[in-house]
Structures are given as C-alpha cells and as structure tokens.
Image (tube, rainbow, N blue to C red):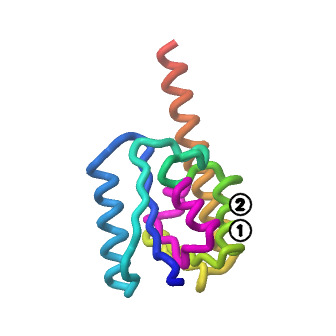
Amino acid sequence: MDKKICGYCRTAQENFEDINLQIETLKKFANKNGFNNLVIFADNGVSGMNLDRKEFQKLLNLIKSDKVSTLIVKDISRLGRNHVEVGNLIDAILPKYNVRLISVDGSIDSEKSTDEFLQLQKIISKLYEENKSMQKNKLLAKRI
C-alpha cells in the first residue's frame, strides 16, 4: 500500500485568496521536492483554537488509518493555535504513525529538525495567539 503525501491549509477568516495562495505554495514545494500526488486538505474560515475542523478531521482519520507518509504545511500555525493539541499532534500522533512533518515557511522537516526547534515553533505559535488575543481584548475595552 502506497501512503499519501498530504498538505494542510487553514485560514481563520474566510479568505479564498489566502487559502489558494497556501495551496499553491504547498503544490510548488511538493513538485520541487519530488512529492508526487499531493492530496490537499483545506479549512477556509475556521479557527485554529481546536482541532475540530472538517478537513483537518478527514486528514487526521487518514493519518490514524496509517495511510499518510508525509504532512506538509505552510507553517506550524496552520495546524492550529492551541499549543497543547498541536503539541500532541507533533509529539505523539505523527510519530506514532511515522508521519514526516514538513513546514515550508518554518523550514521544519521532522526527519532533520531537532526536538528543541519544534518546541520553539510551538512556543512562538502560542505567543502569537496570546498577543493577538490581548490586542483583541484591548480593542473591545476601548469600545466599552
């Protein structure tokens, strides 16, 4: 059985231009690096704060069926913004099913990267979300 090469894209706000740009980025990367027959999963306009996303769940089911060899994302934040869930995905689920994780923009390749670098990426993603949340709260406070 040949395992699939999968790509995953996500936007928090529905934005067809951004989602299409992510898809094209993954396709170009895949073609350039010999990853044939890329299967794309994309959630457009869905929060990354939990993993309960239609296309992500389809991808996760495929991974848990041991049918995926490689997962390519534009950057780690596309997987999600909840550092605990994304951490579990990166540290437990993907290794359990021998899925290689590649982040195009973050220059991450789980076959080559160190655990420390992946941890740093998760921390940066969490800090980004916390900062975004604080800015949102400040904006709401100004309105009151």
Please state which amino acid type lies under the numbered disc 1.
Asp
Figure check: 134 above or below 98: above
Quickly name the residue at label 2: 88
Q: x, y (%) of residue 26? A: 37, 69
- Span colored in magenta: 57-79
Q: Quadrant of residue 29?
A: bottom left
- Residue 7 in the magenta stretch? The answer is no
Residue lying farthest front? 1
In this rendering, the answer to whether 90 lies above or below 125 is below
Per the image, is 74 magenta? Answer: yes
Q: Position of residue 41 (x, y in %)?
A: 43, 59
The numbered dot on residue 91 is 1
Q: Secondary structure at mark 2?
A: helix
Q: Residue type at mark 2? A: Asn
Taking 131 as reference, is 99 above or below it? below
Check whether the beta carbons of the residues at disc 1 and disc 2 lie within 8 A of each other: yes
74 w.r.t. 43: above or below = below
